[in-house]
Image: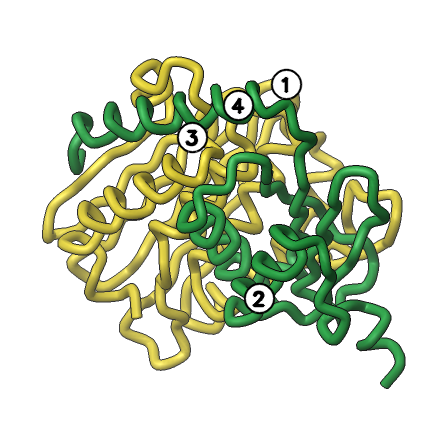
Chain colours: A yellow, B green
Amino acid sequence: MKEISLHLLDIVQNSVKAGAAHVDIRFHLGADGILEMGVKDDGCGMSPDFLARVRSPFTTTRTTRKVGLGIPLLMQNAMQSGGRVDIESEEGVGTEIVAYFVTGSIDCLPLGDLPSTMASIIMGSPDNPEFSLRCSSPGGEMSFSTEEIRPLLEGVSLAEPSVVQWIRESLDEEIQPILGGIMK
Amino acid sequence: MKSLAELEAIRKATLSRINLRKEEKGETTRVVIGMATCGIAAGARPVMLAFMDEIEKRKLTHVTVSQTGCIGMCRLEPMVDVILPGKEKVTYVHVKPEMVPRIVAEHVVNGRPVEEYTIGAAEKN
């Protein structure tokens, strides 16, 4: 992956497939330059046995093939920057995955186009789950959620091209002042 | 939030397009993009957004864009299926955002697949 955002796009699919009703995404950039990316869902969760194996590229829920590279690739890029990935999960409750990136490292990926990524995520699952995004840094904070705008759209799908475009543009305007420094 | 008033305007405009779609009763053309780990890593996100932009620009009412998982041909990603009503599925491989306007103009709008971008052409080489 070329951007941290692309890992988000990938990892969120796990929450969607876990049947989550809510997926809460957060990015926090600390004054120390450490970027925290958290994805928390209320999906089916993992058994202790599966959780113990989930970091292996040879673990997957797919039946078509025996490899699953989403989490291993995320770990590789987090660790390459000097960071790490924490995963907590409980069956029937949900899963939280938190990746830490040391943005000052020359080996750290850029955050990339987070607004386009959020638009792609929402477009891919426009009816459910509900997604929320919170970004914070010393530069300020913002929050967004599909639950907030869904009632305003009164039945117009979040996957309509015009709505997707609005999500991209409005998120870009809000995220730039907070995380703009690490996007490229 | 940027402007919720703007979103309201978008809702109204989109509703009239949805109604138009219902009146026309035309069948829908489907654009399906592979968005598993392999597709995303190969550049599927800008491709999908390029389709959305092109559809929005041309105000096409009868086209839906959706995502699918990995179909096992990761080396050909980003892959895009275009399914015209009543026609066989056409699969495009190694799709780049620059290729999207042509696929939309020639295939989605005019019904002529862009042969050189298809899986058939790629596998011949």
Q: Are marks 2 and 4 in contact (CB under 8 Å)?
A: no
B56 shown above or below A81: above
Mark 3 sits on what residue? A131
Please give the chain letter of the residue carrying mark 1. Answer: A
Query: Left or right of A18: which side holds A124?
Result: left
Q: Disc 4 marks which amino acid?
A: Asp
- Give coordinates of residue A3: x percent, y percent: 44, 65
Say if residue A111 shows up in the picture. yes
Q: Disc 1 marks which amino acid?
A: Gly
Q: Which mark is residue B101?
A: none
Q: Residues within 10 Å of mark 2 (few under 14, many from 20)?
A: some
Tags 2 and 3 on a common chain: no
Q: Residue at x 81, y 50 (%)?
A: B89
- Front one among B66 and A107: B66
In primary-sequence order, the first of circles 3 and 1 is 1
Please give the chain letter of the residue carrying mark 4. Answer: A
Q: Nearer the viewer, mark 3 or mark 1?
A: 3
Please give the chain letter of the residue carrying mark 3. Answer: A
Q: Are marks 2 and 1 in contact (CB under 8 Å)?
A: no
Q: Quadrant of residue A170?
A: top left
Mark 2 sits on what residue? B102
Mark 4 sits on what residue? A127
- Front one among A117 and A133: A117
B1 shown above or below B51: above
- Front one among A102 and B121: B121
- Give coordinates of residue A176: x percent, y percent: 19, 55
Q: Label 2 vs label 4: CA separation?
A: 30 Å
Q: Residues within 10 Å of mark 3 (few under 14, many from 20)?
A: many
Q: Residue at x 16, y 58 (%)?
A: A31
